[in-house]
Image: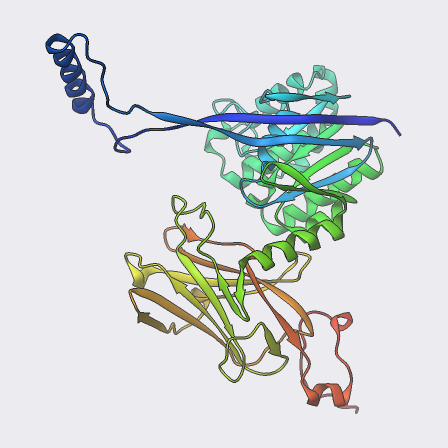
Amino acid sequence: MSSVIRVENLGKKYNLRHQQREQYTAMRDVITDGFKSFARKLIHPFQFSTESGPSSEDFWALKDVTFDVKQGDRIGIIGRNGAGKSTLLKILSRITEPTTGRVRIKGRVASLLEVGTGFHPELTGRENIFLNGAILGMGRAEIRNKFDEIVDFAEIEKFLDTPVKRYSSGMYVRLAFAVAAHLEPEILIVDEVLAVGDSQFQKKCLGKMEDVSTREGRTVLFVSHNFSAINTLCTRSILLSNGTISSYGNSIDITNEYICGLSSKQIGQNGKFDLTNRVNLYNKGVPIILSVTVCDHNGYPSDTLVMGKSAKIQFELQEIENINNLDFGIGFYTPEGFRITSATTWSSETVTRTNSNNSLKVTYQFDMIPFTAGKIMMSPSVSNSKHGIVYDHPEMSCYFNVVEETLFTEKKKISRTYGVIYIDGQWQLH
């Protein structure tokens, strides 16, 4: 089958400027600096200024990226934040020009990259459907034929004649995806923007993407941190690391490689995870969660916990204002990225906090490990849920392994084939 996307030695370079002064400059500073510079030139007309101006450096968001995509392929693109995923999709969507290399695309491309991309905020939902169809090169009659399907899928019939600037982010995404998926593009490109929608709509979108690929032979490129969705939808995946392709192959193999690599980088010693060497996207780059320690039922740090026994997980945090208003959480995942459950302070009546050595420590206590034998990934978080503020959320950054207790193994081996959660109860035959 012929290639519909061919990427050859693709590179994208940005020039980063570093200002050698305060981050914020008032108008009076600009005027004052201008007068000072003018005065210096009058007094010393032949003396060059020794003040350092803004410096710059080249940053390669993508470098030497090469791959082929066949017609009807469903390709997942994964990688850490800043790996170059969004830059790649913007180049494939013809939003950004590459610095080096070239991209060959056969067919019409529909992209869903960011909330609001491709919509005019002053136009209504109805008008934006026709606008997007026209951008994709469709005639008015073609758009009318798909119109009812789009509205039904997006579930926004009541707000169809409302300007989209008044839509919530969830409504925006529902309409944007419905338009992108139903206006018959040969290539559908979807970024992490689907995470804005509720879980039911996400399932609906995944089903639609699978349908347009398998039944209609269209190509799908999907970026997500939800590895369960990647493995369900995509047959093959690309792992990006620092702007280059680290691996390209079977989705399950690629997601496992990514998770194992992420865990091995974060772990310092048995049960202790150092999270200081990273960029926190939620707090101007500064990590709030400094480390996570997993302790077994004996209270010792360990990355191996016994099924049915107690355990505790402790965060060490940077000092932060309004400590009493913070909410803490831990998301628990399978290695494939499927979310099992969460533990949060807003769903708990008591929170134990300990101040120690100019840092804050928060502990979550397991009364009994409910997971079956295998690996459990964790995503810790610090937020203010009342005001909708996230301070730090290193996803899938630490883990622990669950092993069976002797008592369980004497009865019957309980493996992951029984599920991720073990439910203990009493059976009676009447």
The residue lying furthest to the front in this view is 46
Q: How is the image coloured?
A: rainbow
Residue located 67% across and 83% down the image: 424
Residue 157 visible in this rendered orientation of the protein? no
Viewer-closest of 312 and 352: 312
Viewer-closest of 256 and 268: 268
Q: Is residue 29 above or below residue 421?
A: above
Residue 196 visible in this rendered orientation of the protein? yes
Number of dots carrying numbers: 0
Residue 371 percent across, percent down from the top left = 64, 73
Q: Quadrant of the N terminus?
A: top right
Q: Quadrant of the C terminus?
A: bottom right
Q: Is residue 154 above or below residue 267?
A: above
Q: To which quarter of the image does residue 145 belong? A: top right
Residue located 58% across and 26% down the image: 12
Residue 340 percent across, percent down from the top left = 62, 64
Residue 82 percent across, percent down from the top left = 53, 40
Residue 281 percent across, percent down from the top left = 45, 45
The residue lying furthest to the right in this view is 1
Viewer-closest of 28 and 368: 28
Q: To which quarter of the image does residue 129 belong? A: top right
Q: Is residue 319 above or below residue 174?
A: below
Left of 373 or right of it: where is 83?
Answer: left
Q: Is residue 174 above or below residue 347?
A: above
